[in-house]
Image: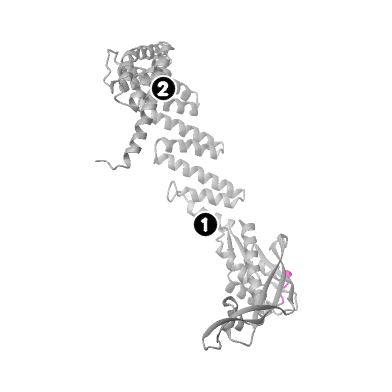
């Protein structure tokens, strides 16, 4: 027994099916009156698909289906007579499908052998396209030949080895394009082979060769990143192809840029170490995983300065440029802390009035609750630190600035506390933590370090955008 809640749902489905079948049946009668017997038959079939026990639709189908058969057969025969084999095949396929659907509902009448005629039309279509393919192949029109061979193959599988000949045509097309240095076109032609014959070994070898030649071409033009991409792609199609692995290493070695982030120079009176800012920039930049950038780590950079007898507190751009050239760095990042401004706002306070509840005894000795006003002050003292920096990316060989950027950021800290002599429980709950709170903002040197960390992260973000 079906659950009760299903009955409304099933009723809706039944009504919907009835409506759709009735609509299709009415359409079938309209098409019949217009002499469109094929369309009328298709609508009868749709009505029966929606409602298999639809007797009126079945009766109508029995009367109109033979007319639809004659109509489609005549169309296909005319196309056949005109040697329009593509359309003839399509016509017989439509007739064959229509008859199969009609037979599903027990409607049977005398017909010609449609499948035999369809097979004959396919044979003729395959012969037609194969002949065109042979003509095009003889004239070195490889793309047209491949297309025609595949059409013949579509009608009769591998008709006269049409699939192998289509592959040969694509190879001819790809080889000609490769000879003319049209690598992209050659790859498209070879890829067509893999599309119709997945895993084809010769096609994969030819694709590998095309990428190999492209890689050598880009390397010669000093487009090392594109060369690397071409050499790396070879592995997808052929392992250990020629000396591609060696070219991958060579191209990467040329494509990668070797950089250093040197300690920033402090041009302010404040006591700060530019090494901290450089270290923060370096950490975030390395974490960005730039494929074509290799940074000196902190230890290597410190050792480099030591080897060149440079004091990290007295660095100059000229000294660093010489170090970068001597060490074979492509470029280096360096900067200056231009200004540090520490400002303390005067202490201020806000006075609050609060009603606290107390328990007292009345004249009769009964304990009762009363409210009592208390007064307290909430004090605040704030500090703002602003730092201005400037950094540059310098080309080691020419000393030219590749990028220059100035940044200014500030950070604020506020101390808030309450001065009150009574019990902590007299105060509102949200104010009680302020009773023992610190009475001064964080020290300037702590805020400066925090701000340097923030600046380092933002400079690193700029560098990542630049090098990507």
User: Is 368 above or below relative to 24?
Assistant: below
Magenta region, residue range: 314-318
Q: Residue at x 47, y 37 (%)?
A: 190
Separation of marks 1 and 2 at Cα, in angstroms: 48 Å
Q: Which mark is residue 249?
A: 1
Where does residue 318 sit, x and y in percent of width and height? 73, 69
Secondary structure category for the residue under label 2: helix
Residue lying at the far front in this picture: please name it. Answer: 364
In front here: 4 or 72?
Answer: 4
User: Is 181 above or below relative to 393?
Assistant: above
| Count of numbered circles in the view | 2
**Quarter of the figure with residue 72:** top left
**In the shown orientation, is residue 418 left or right of residue 27?**
right
How many neighbours does mark 1 have within 10 angstroms: few (below 14), some (14-19), or many (20 or more)? some
Q: Is residue 259 magenta?
A: no
Label 2 belongs to which residue? 130
Q: Residue at x 33, y 16 (%)?
A: 60
Q: Quadrant of the N terminus?
A: top left
Q: Residue at x 32, y 42 (%)?
A: 5
**Quarter of the figure with residue 205:** top left
Q: Residue at x 41, y 40 (%)?
A: 202
């Amino acid at each position: 027994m079906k659950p009760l809640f299903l009955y409304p749902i099933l009723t809706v489905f039944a009504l919907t099916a009835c409506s759709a079948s009735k609509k299709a049946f009415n359409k079938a009668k309209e098409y019949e009156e217009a002499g469109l017997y094929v369309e009328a038959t298709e609508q009868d079939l749709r009505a029966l698909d929606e409602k298999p026990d639809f007797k009126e639709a079945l009766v109508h189908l029995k009367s109109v289906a033979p007319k639809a058969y004659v109509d489609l057969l005549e169309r296909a025969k005319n196309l056949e007579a005109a040697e329009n084999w593509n359309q003839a095949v399509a016509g017989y396929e439509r007739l064959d499908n229509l008859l199969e659907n009609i037979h599903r509902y027990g409607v049977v009448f005398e017909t010609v052998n449609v499948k035999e005629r369809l097979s004959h039309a396919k044979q003729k279509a395959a012969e037609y396209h194969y002949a065109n393919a042979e003509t095009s192949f003889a004239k070195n029109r490889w793309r047209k030949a491949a297309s025609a061979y595949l059409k013949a193959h579509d009608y009769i599988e591998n008709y006269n080895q049409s699939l192998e000949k289509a592959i040969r045509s694509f190879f001819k097309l790809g080889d000609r394009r490769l000879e003319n240095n049209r690598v992209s076109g050659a790859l498209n032609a070879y890829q067509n082979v893999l599309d119709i014959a997945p895993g084809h070994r010769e096609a994969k070898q030819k694709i590998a060769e095309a990428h190999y030649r492209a890689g050598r071409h880009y390397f010669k033009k000093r487009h090392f990143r594109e060369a690397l991409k071409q050499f790396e792609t070879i592995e997808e199609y052929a392992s250990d192809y020629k000396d591609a692995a060696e070219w991958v290493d060579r191209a990467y070695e040329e494509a990668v840029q070797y950089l250093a982030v040197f300690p920033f120079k402090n041009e302010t009176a404040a006591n700060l170490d530019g090494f901290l800012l450089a270290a923060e920039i370096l950490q975030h930049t390395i974490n960005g995983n730039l494929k074509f950038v290799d940074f000196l780590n902190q230890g290597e950079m410190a050792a480099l300065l030591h080897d060149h007898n440079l004091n990290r507190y007295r660095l100059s751009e000229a000294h660093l440029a010489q170090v970068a050239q001597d060490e074979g760095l492509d470029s280096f990042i360096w900067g200056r802390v231009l200004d540090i401004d520490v400002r303390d706002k005067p202490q201020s306070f806000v006075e609050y009035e609060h009603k606290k509840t107390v328990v007292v005894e009345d004249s009769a000795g009964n304990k009762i609750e009363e409210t009592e006003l208390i007064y307290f002050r909430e004090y605040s003292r704030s500090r703002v630190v602003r730092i201005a920096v400037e950094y540059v990316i310098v080309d080691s060989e020419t000393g030219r600035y590749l990028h220059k950027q100035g940044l200014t950021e500030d950070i604020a800290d506020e101390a808030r506390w309450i001065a009150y002599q009574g019990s902590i429980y007299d105060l509102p709950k949200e104010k009680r933590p302020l009773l023992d709170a610190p009475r001064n903002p964080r020290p300037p040197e702590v805020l400066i370090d925090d701000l340097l960390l923030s600046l380092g992260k933002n400079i690193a973000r700029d560098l990542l955008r630049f090098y990507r």
